[in-house]
Amino acid sequence: MREGAAADSEDTLSFAARTGVRPMIGKYPLERVNEAYERVMSDKAGFRVVLVM
């Protein structure tokens, strides 16, 4: 299997859709961008951080 091939991404998304897998994200309003950045840089986020506008 080729690493990073488009078919791999398609298979992964298909699996997630079939099984209900969802990402773990932390949402921060844009006004709290500094707090979100600090959590990421200090490895305290634990998952993805998303800024909401």
Image: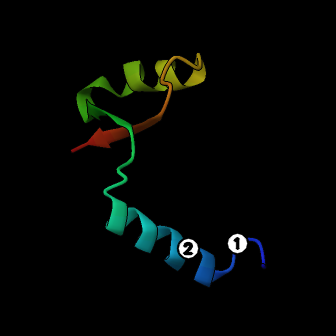
Residue 53 in the image: state x and y as whole percent. Answer: 21, 45
Q: Residue at label 1? A: 4
Q: Residue at label 2? A: 9
SS at badge 1: loop
> The N terminus appears in which quarter of the rendering?
bottom right
CA distance for labels 2 and 1? 7 Å
Which sits in the foreground, 48 or 15? 15
Q: Residue furthest front?
A: 19
Q: Residues within 10 Å of mark 2 (few under 14, many from 20)?
A: few
Which sits in the foreground, 42 or 4? 4
Looking at the picture, which amino acid does disc 2 mark?
Ser
Residue 46 in the image: state x and y as whole percent. Answer: 50, 25
Q: Residue at x 61, y 82 (%)?
A: 6
Residue 13 in the image: state x and y as whole percent. Answer: 44, 70
Q: Residue furthest bottom?
A: 7
In this rendering, would 32 be left or right of 3?
left
Q: Residue at x 48, y 19 (%)?
A: 39
Residue 20 in the image: state x and y as whole percent. Answer: 31, 57
Looking at the picture, which amino acid does disc 1 mark?
Gly
